[in-house]
Amino acid sequence: MVGCKIRRGRPNGGVARRAPSAYISAVSLKKKYKYRRRLPHLQCDYKALFVTFRTFGRWVLPDAARDVVFASCRNETRAQMIALVVMPDHVHLIFVPQQASDGTSYALPEIVKSIKSFSAHQINKLLGRRGPVWDEEFFDHAIRNPEALAGKIEYVLFNPVQNKLATRPSQYRWAWAEDVLADEAVRATPC
């Protein structure tokens, strides 16, 4: 096995240290961590992930653009969507990466890039505009247990309510969740 450094913020110019649990195979490293910017993106195979990405410059998406993003997320074949919400200037997703033909899980950056790229092209075409739609970076969090999964689903669905875009989650047309707590195929367990 080849070790890898997990890049974290280094206050006071500190040096990155090798984390003991950060050893993964060279093949896995190349596939899953090809895309790295300022934030580390960690992925455990067959585990649920919570992902957030924002619009470029906090641009507010018009309704038609939110429809495009919602459809792009729901139709992503590399991930089993559990819940999602498309807010005016950001998107929250909960999903489990699907298996590729070689038996490995699709990489988190590959899934997010697919959603962002496809939706950005469609939005720009629809609105007759050019330029970036999404910030380059995204934020992710591995969901470690069923209680955390239930909490994240609730957070995603109630995000429009908290932002006063709806009085109930069912009133917001760009929020959706699968009933996964009864689905034995999806387990949010520690990595």
Image (spheres, rainbow, N blue to C red):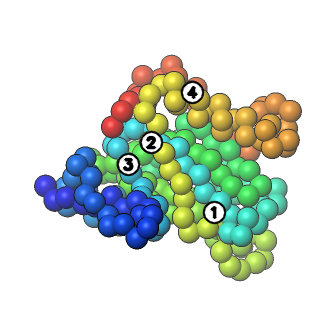
Look at mark 4 in the image and give the residue it sits on. 150
Q: Which mark is residue 119?
A: 1
Q: How many residues crowd around disc 2 within 10 Å: few (fewer than 14), some, or many (20 or more)?
A: many
Residue 112 point in image, percent of width and height: 51, 57
Q: CA distance from mark 3 to mark 2?
A: 7 Å
* Camera sees residue 102: no
* Three-letter residue code for mark 3: Gln
As drawn, 86 above or below 120: above
Q: Earlier in the sequence, mark 1 or mark 2?
A: 1
* Three-letter residue code for mark 4: Ala
The residue lying toward the viewer, choosing from 97 and 149, is 149
Question: Quadrant location of the N terminus?
Answer: bottom left
Residue 142 point in image, percent of width and height: 44, 42
Look at mark 3 in the image and give the residue it sits on. 43
* Three-letter residue code for mark 2: Ala
Q: Which mark is residue 142?
A: 2
How many numbered circles does the render carry?
Answer: 4
Q: Residue furthest left?
A: 1
Q: How many residues crowd around disc 3 within 10 Å: few (fewer than 14), some, or many (20 or more)?
A: many
Residue 88 point in image, percent of width and height: 77, 55
Q: Earlier in the sequence, mark 1 or mark 3?
A: 3
The residue lying toward the viewer, choosing from 110 and 160, is 160
Residue at (40, 70) in percent of width and height: 13
